[in-house]
Amino acid sequence: MRGKKGKFIVPGDPVGTIAAQSLGEPGTQMNMRSFHYAGTAEAVPTGLPRVIEVVDARRTPKKPMMDIHVKERYAKDEKKVRKIANNLEHVTLHKIAGMMEDFDKKVILIRVNPSELKRLGLDMRLIRAKIVEFLGNKAKVEQRENKVRIKFSKKEKIINIRKTMNKLKLLHIKGIPRIEKAMIIKEGEKYFIRTGGSNLAEVIKLPEIEVGTVWTNDIMEVNKVFGIEAARNAIVKELKIIMDSQGLPIDIRWLLLLSDAMCKSGTIQAVGRHGLSGHKAGILARAAFEETMKHLVNASIKAEEDKLSGVTENVIIGQIVPIGTGIVKLKFASGRGTQKAKK
Amino acid sequence: MNEHKIAVYVNGKLIGQYYDSGEKLLNLLREQRRIGRLSDQINFSYNPKLKSFYVNTDRGRVRRPYIIVKNGKSMLTDEIKDQLVKGEINFKYLLDNGIVEFLDAGEEENAYVALTEDEITEEHTHLDFDASTIYSVVTASLPYSNHNLSVRNTMACSQTKQALGMYVSNFNIRMDSRSHIMYYPQVPLVQTAAYDFLNLKKRPAGQNFVVAVATYYGYTMKDAIIINKKAIERGLARTVQFKTYKITELMYPGGQKDKFQIPLPTTSGYRGEESYKYLDEDGLISPEVPVSGGDVIVGNTSPPRFLEEISVFGVTEEKRRENSLSIKSGDKGIVDSVMVTNGIDGNRMVKVRVRDIKVPELGDKFSTRHGQKGVIGLIVPEEDMPFSENGIIPDLLINPHAIPSRMTVGHLIEMLGGKAGSVDASIKDGTAFTGDDFESFKKVLADHGFDEYGEEVFYDGLTGKKVKMKIFMGVIYYQRLHHLVSNKIHARSRGPVQLLTHQPTEGRAREGGLRFGEMERDCLVGYGASMLIKERLLDESDKATILVCNQCGSTAVHDYIRNRNYCPVCDSTDVSIVEVSYAFKLLLDEIKSIGIFPRLITSDKAE
Ligand SMILES: [Zn+2]
């Protein structure tokens, strides 16, 4: 690791401990400040809760988000950008229509909101087509103006009507799944789209957008779509954003180190019992951290051997810890009266 | 009809419904209570949102009195006030005649309370006796608390509770296990209305200090205070600490008893003649003997643990055990009184009270009634203290930086009030909201030839030079808090270790070490200071030497008779001597106890 002035980190320097302290100390300050903002309307986790979210490698963030920049030639055209944004938003049937089931007559009644139709630039024929496509020959579909009537056979079981209804509610009309909301934000002359909800795989397929600038806060999705190297950078970026927003200056090298540690196995590992700390090499180190009995018993079943290579293990047994001045060892080659240092 | 249905609860239990307006019912029942038809201890409340009417008659409700207001007029008229002053009527009369009533937390929700008589409107239902009655008992004793931030008042409350004073006047015959009495306690110059009601004048806890707001070189940094050495020698803030030791002559099964006596040299655990030199023939110490940590104050022997212990010579002899009461390590003092009595179980009991005079020293904690706490940073000889042009030398200096950021304006007003009170020989009223105005203090000070804002020209006590700025000086009530350095000071180089872990003990009482914890260890790890970690955690802690069998890895033992090391598991004599922490040895034992066999694989150190 090359430092700022071209100096190297010395062999034996406990970079992990220093990284943990460099992140942990400002973390205590962050904790105290950011909880004061609790209860504000948009509860996007920032500060410590978000750090925990990233470091714990949660499957999805509490509030997934994306920033999507469109191709340069559209960027200044508000209408065009808005149109793209509208096409992103995931629209399901129950969002634009009132739905009701009548179990006596064995029908489902759907009344589509005309103003929603207009806003989204849809027409009834498309909706009818989608419904017909979904139902196949299970029921008959009648459409008059903005009303759709789905008629089942008289012998249809009520439970099947309810099941169909529930599926119809989530019928995909347009947009990209999991994108709940899309709004446009002006930045200088240009516009970009911010979405609530994230679906990286689908968004990057759109022709109008600039793939290289798409950002999501869902790190697991980055890992799935672009791979572990991208996920590593995403972790660094996410942590850096939080630290900067809190006004806490942290050298990016510590974030890089943390990110590297989390991604070293090829998948994203959480920091903690189920991740990095649970997979430490030494039995004693693992047992000292959490779930002591579990680790001791498992180690005894497998007749594991602790090489006593870590810091914790050596503190426990009372030996010199292999870090800093303790990592240096002298070896003598005896015989023939010559002494030469190995290693 | 259904719309107006109101649920009626008595003590939280639904008893029925009411089909009219809840307000009407509330007024009706209140009226009945005021004229004495219903007990004055019953409270009613109505919640229009929940359409619920509550009647509470049970115990444990916190209630407080209010003056009843009717049609925008206080029922406590001037006429009644006159009668009260003359003593013709009493509080009971007010309660019985619908002038005053007690409300509980529920009924307060239905009341609209005016704080002063002037602000009463038609809508008000009650009037408070005084605006300062919104405060609790302790808060009400803080002067000018309406000029302070609420957090400062909170702090002042908790500090007031720690103040040393004269909490009882019969302290001389009491045997409290621990108590402090101030030598010359004073009533504050700036008091509040609560001082009269709470009898605080009879139980003062502090003294009026002459305080200048000034720095003194670096010694007032971070809320440290400077104290005049002469003032301390005159008895400023001096307290005495009483500590009572107790011992009982216990009865044991089999009719045996403890015995208070000077233990005989044959007693097992005999501490030597020197230790018992203060004891009288009855085994008790006499009053006015100076004692310190470890000294025996009551000699006591207990019967042997096992009957008829057989000694080496084969004869049975009764060997009593030494079980004396001695002064705790670190304590010192003079035996104040010795009391012999019977305990609740009828056994003879002795209580020894030890007194120790606590003269203020470096690090003792002081506080005003505004949450302005500080510890003594330096005790300055009187001749080195700054003095005013009138020749007044302050008792105490407080750092000016303590004031602006904390915004304890009440502190400054009290200082001014105390100064005014001491020049015109009067007690000032600092009751919140209604106390003496600080403008009045300005006049008093000006009339007596002082600066009306309390600022005075000062001279440096060390150089004699005039101080460039005027310095604010006043008189303020200071409290000595019971965090005394002499009861907390603690250091250790070597000392006792715990039986189980062989690690140093914890805590001052056990002469313990200071914990070098996980985070401290991490700091050394961060520096890469491995040798220092090993020294702290092994050499200076629980270093132990164990024997390990090179063949099977179990712990080996030393056979003293044949003088050899061998392994009790595999009988091998191929044994290594290993240095580990005793805690690790303990860990191995515990792992063995859960049925896991840990093996230590040994290798040559040079490798
Ligand atoms: Zn063996």
Image (tube, rainbow, N blue to C red):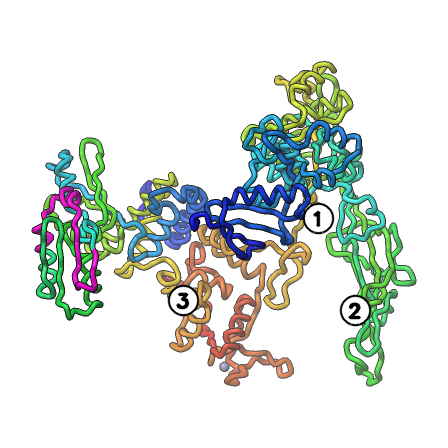
The vertical placement of B351 against B186, above or below, is below
Residue A327 position in % (x across, y down) = 42, 58
The vertical placement of B408 against B9, above or below, is above
How many neighbours does mark 1 have within 10 angstroms: few (below 14), some (14-19), or many (20 or more)?
A: few
Left or right of B590 on screen, residue B464: right
* Residue assigned mark 2: B269
Observer-nearest of B573 and B338 = B338
Left or right of A15 on screen, residue B71: right
* Residue assigned mark 3: A282
Is A75 covered by the magenta stretch? Answer: no
| Residue stretch in magenta | A100-129
The alpha-carbon separation of the residues under discs 3 and 2 comes to: 48 Å
Is A103 covered by the magenta stretch? Answer: yes
Say which of marks 2 and 1 sits in front: 1
Left or right of A282 on screen, residue A233: left
Residue appearing at x 26%, y 56% in the figure: A220
The alpha-carbon separation of the residues under discs 2 and 1 comes to: 29 Å
Kind of residue at disc 3: Gly
